[in-house]
Amino acid sequence: MSDLDAFRAEIRAWLEENCPAEMRQPAADEDDVCWGGRNVVFKNPAQKLWLDRCVAKGYTVPDWPQAYGGAGMTPAQAKIWREEMARIGARPPLSSFGIWMLGPALLKFGTEEQKVHYLGQIARGEIRWCQGYSEPGSGSDLVSLQTFGEDKGDHWVVNGQKIWTSYADKADWIFCLVRTDKTNKYQGISFLLFDMTTPGVTTRPIKLISGASPFCETFFDNVVVPKAQLVGQLNRGWDVAKYLLGHEREMISGAGGGDRLNAIGAIVARRGLEDPILRAELALFDVDALAYTAMGEKFMDEVKVGKAHPAQPNMMKYCGTELNKRRHELLMAAGGSTALEWDSEETRGGAPARNWLRTKANSIEGGTSEVMLNVISKRILDLPGA
Amino acid sequence: MPLYHTEDQAMLAETVTGFLGDEGGIKKQLRALRDANDGAGYGADLWKEFANLGLTGILVGEADGGLGLGHVEAGIVLKEIGRNLTPSPFLATSVGGVTALAAASADLKGRYLPGVLSGEAVLALAIDEGAKHRPERIALRAEKAGNGFRLSGRKDFVIHGATADALIVAARTSGADGDADGVTLFAVPRDAAGLGHNAVRLVDSSIASHVTFDGVEVDGGSVIGEVDGGRALLDKVLAATRVGAAAELTGVASGAFDVTTAYLRTRKQFGQLIGEFQALQHRAAHLYSEVEIATAAAIKAQQLLDANGADPVSDRTALMVSVAKAKAGRACNLAVREGVQMHGGVGMTDEYDIGLYMKRDRALAEFMGDPFYHAERVAQLSGY
């Protein structure tokens, strides 16, 4: 038995022993996802038990170093962890922007002190983070952002407004892009961390077409941020942001833990499928979805050994999100008038329609499909003037 | 197993890229053969060079004198064949034919494999009946006659069938046309009495035969595998050839993509390079993505087929094989359509290569089942 086989056996046995039965079925809705944080509310005891057990072993962030709350798994071991989790249909014990986005940025750019402090909190699910990037006037053209941090010696005073801050009303801390030099567009932005309870921070949820409000407008009115809460170099926050956007795009593309693009024809057919042209569309979708799954596997394999093109996450994000939108269009078509129901019990409160509407943001958030295509043209294809 | 090439595979790719770039190029092979109105549809000298590099026996076991490599390696060769539009009997002979012969008697292997290994022989696949790929129905009959069989019926779309040393024929030895059982594979020699070839040139300049079997008599030793039990072997031959065709399609797609993006970098209109126009950049970027995904699907299918080994093709492998063939067919079709359009007027001329890619895509997409056929298989294998 190879070392990896032994490792797999160990993980399998641990999961068998420790993953509660309730946690071995896909999350039905947002409430089933454990986001952690100061104000965490567990939906049931199993959710808490599952989190506690994973935290104790470092399994909330299996591939982070043990010193920062992880399990120190190698890439090959982490892949086995994911495979064994998937095998029993286990839910992630903890989901958070801290794990997906801030963590990787801190691992690369943070000081040792920041790593120990913030990564540990993230791994234990103690602090829930939100991301302050977009502003009302800075969407795709993010680098034009205006939120300003005035230098006051040992701290900055931040004023401005962010938009599309996911779960800002539920988050404990924010990682935020702030202009610290008005004379330099790209090298005048810094990456700051601060507590959402700091005086001067207010949030207002934005109601979406799905009826949900996962995003907020966030306002900063003379918010004091100590200098120790800067990540990376002063005025080089754009480097951190770009690095982090790569992770966000991986996440949204599905390769890093987002919606899995499974084939759907068989699922739809179980409920009856009488329309031959819909069946044909489903089959063509399944071809694309299964091919994309192979692409996701190839991409992750290449990332692990540094073979992937650095701009490839943009391609994954573009294709993954466009496919997911198509998937939900087909699910709506297959669901017929039942899928239109907005708050019935049968649809668990209109889940099909609300999920369908939610997917429309996939190709907007984290860089629009059009921006992704721009980046592919420029950085991968090297087309002129792109 | 990671979905990228190992060091050995990357070395093979380098060798094959150099070899086919030099010797298998469009001008040297495809255009030369076409303009000379060559009747075979491939260059015999080039086939010998394939053999000199060991490539004709890439899937032949080492015990039988081959390289003993797998479908990932065969796919590397096919991708370069696709990129260069090289007319070659490699897919039918060294992938499809060799997969069939792997199940043959020592005697039958001895009859054909040495010629394949030395690059003196080629094999053709006689499977389709009619204009569409429907191997679930095999109507060509093979009846017991003495210690052998007598074959009657017809086969279509038999690529370079008229020049092949042997035809690998899927025939019905019992049951009804649509039965899974009752199929038997035969190796029928070129000079068998009663074999008729109507060879026609196809749109991509390849040569395919309508083959008629007018009571063709073969001895019992021509049977490959089991009498009446040939379906599993036929499925293996189909899976191997489909995966190979998918790999070749990804090569055609990437070749078409490269000549098109090269054109976007040189052609000027309205005082600027047309590659500067966002309308074209976005389409090129979308196309790039589709070709990348098709390539990943093809490699995944190759790996599954290699892992499948000598066992009958599993449903999971068959599913991914059909995903790969369908995806590669659609991505490549997009590549050649966008390619011709982005070339504008010159895309319609024979002088530019992009039209040759378009023709090849059309023929290769049809070969061993088009994307519609394989999407249907994906649905059926998924249970709907």
Image: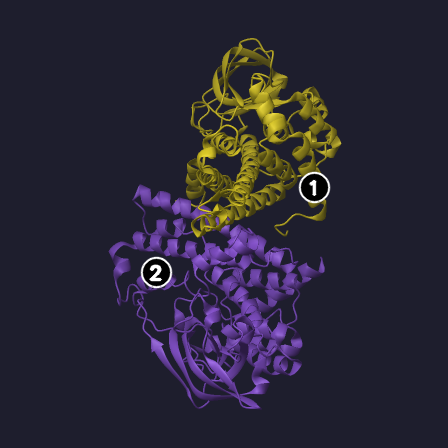
Q: Colour of chain B?
A: yellow
Q: Which residue is most to the front?
A: B271
| Subunit of label 2 | A
Residue B348 image point, x, y percent: 45, 31
In the image, what residue type sits under mark 2? Trp
Nearest to the eye among marks 1 and 2: give it: 1
**Real-space CA distance between mark 1 and mark 2, rounded to the nearest whole angstrom:** 46 Å
Query: Height in image: B42 above or below A342?
Result: above
Chain drawn in purple? A
- Compared to residue B141, the image places residue A298 above or below, namely below
Q: Nearer the viewer, residue B349 or B173?
A: B349
Q: Residue B308 lies in what quarter of the image? A: top right
- Residue placed most toward the observer, B285 or A194: B285
Q: Chain of mark 1?
A: B
* Residue A169 picture quarter: bottom left
Residue carrying label 1: B14
Instruction: Judge the density around disc 1: few (<14), some (14-19), many (≥20) Cα neighbours within 10 Å.
Output: few
The percent coordinates of residue B144 (x first, y second) are 53, 14
Q: Nearer the viewer, residue A276 or B63?
A: A276
Q: Secondary structure at mark 1?
A: helix
Residue for badge 2: A356
